[in-house]
Amino acid sequence: MKADIGIIGGSGLYEMEGLRVVEETEIPTPFGSPSDPFVVGEVDGIRVAFLARHGRGHRVLPTEINYRANIYAFKTLGAHTILSASAVGSMKEAYAPTDIVFPHQFIDRTRHRADTFFGNGIVGHVAFADPICAGAAMLMGEAGREAGANVHVGGVYICIEGPQFSTRAESNLYRSWGVDVIGMTNLQEAKLAREAEICYVTMALVTDYDCWHESGDVSIEQILGYLRANATMAQKIIRLTIPRVAKRTRDCACASALQFAIVTEPSKIPADAKRDLAPIIGRYIQ
């Protein structure tokens, strides 16, 4: 089973209008099991694969997500683009709950996560100055405006470890850095997608102002309420985006990110590393 477009978000995205589900499949990887079985289907004749980031029933912490297995599985399915939807807190007054932000940059404040396919005898250093695929993000932002969302394109997403929300001191520190939104999941996805030469876009669904705001502390009830309000809009945006990214020419750096990134002499790479990473490095290392 193959899919051109990967979609990561909540399990509610499976209910998208126009989706014809073909099958549900578990995909084993050298890095363990992904968060959940993949739901593979068609939208307008385009093969798509959905993955519930936290597992159905939301049972996996941000730190516990097997990011490597998730992205590796999308690669083996043949996905050339991943559209990601996730809840974030707003770090600026201008971004209100139910707004949608398409950030172009990340800051990493995580501590306990595997976020590279390399190691175990093979070294690679991909360029990550521009972590989001600008071409795909532009198309998704346009789809958001067409769908009627209050869209903001660009900005910085700070990724924290969680699962706790920030302290007030941390929240104000991040604001002093010029951060736009705060979340717990998208950075590792973006890093691994780049190593896998997959275009990656973050659709950040604003559910709250972080605790810096005078509206008070963040509550999970508030977040879930706004997330439900955003779910229908997220489906519409993804539905509009799928055919656009499917037909775009991938002339971005994402498509050849590994071309000069692997620095280990091929004859020195262990056979098991070559085998395990074949879907990712096979274009360059036999």
Image (cartoon, rainbow, N blue to C red):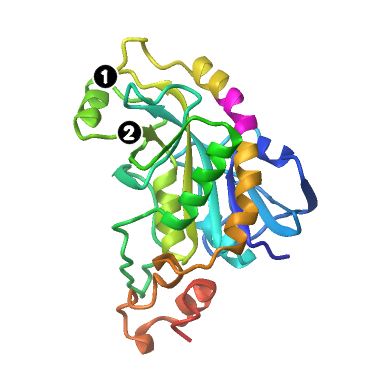
- Closer mark to the observer between disc 1 and disc 2: 2
Whole-number angstrom distance, CA of label 1 to CA of label 2: 16 Å
- Secondary element at image label 1: helix
Q: What x and y, as percent, mark residue 110?
A: 33, 42
Q: Can residue 185 be seen in this snapshot?
A: yes
Residue 253, image quadrant: bottom left
Residue 46 found in image quarter = bottom right
What residue lies at 31% left-to-right and 80% top-to-bottom?
A: 264
Task: Name which residue type carries label 2.
Answer: Asp
Instruction: Tell me if residue 215 comes above or below residue 264 in the rendering.
Output: above
- In the drawing, what numbered circle is on residue 180? 2
**Residue 67 got which mark?**
none
From the top left corner, tell me how far across and down residue 138 is, in percent.
Answer: 46, 50
* Rendered residue at 49%/36% (across/down): 61
Q: Nearer the viewer, residue 268 or 218?
A: 218
Span of residues in magenta: 227-233
What main secondary structure does the magenta stretch of the protein show? helix
Answer whether residue 55 is visible to the viewer in this image.
no
Q: Left or right: where does residue 3 sit relative to residue 73?
A: right
Q: Nearer the viewer, residue 232 or 119?
A: 232
Q: Could you tell whether 206 is left or right of 2 in the image? A: left
Q: Are marks 1 and 2 in contact (CB under 8 Å)?
A: no
Q: Which mark is residue 168?
A: 1
Circle 1 packing at 10 Å, graded few (<14), some (14-19), many (20+), is: some
Mark 2 neighbour density, 10 Å: few (under 14) some (14–19) many (20 or more):
many
Residue in view at x 57 percent, y 28 percent: 230
Query: Is 231 contained in the magenta span?
Result: yes
Total count of labels: 2
Is residue 231 positioned above or below 185 on the image? above
What amino acid type should be assigned to the residue bearing mark 1? Arg
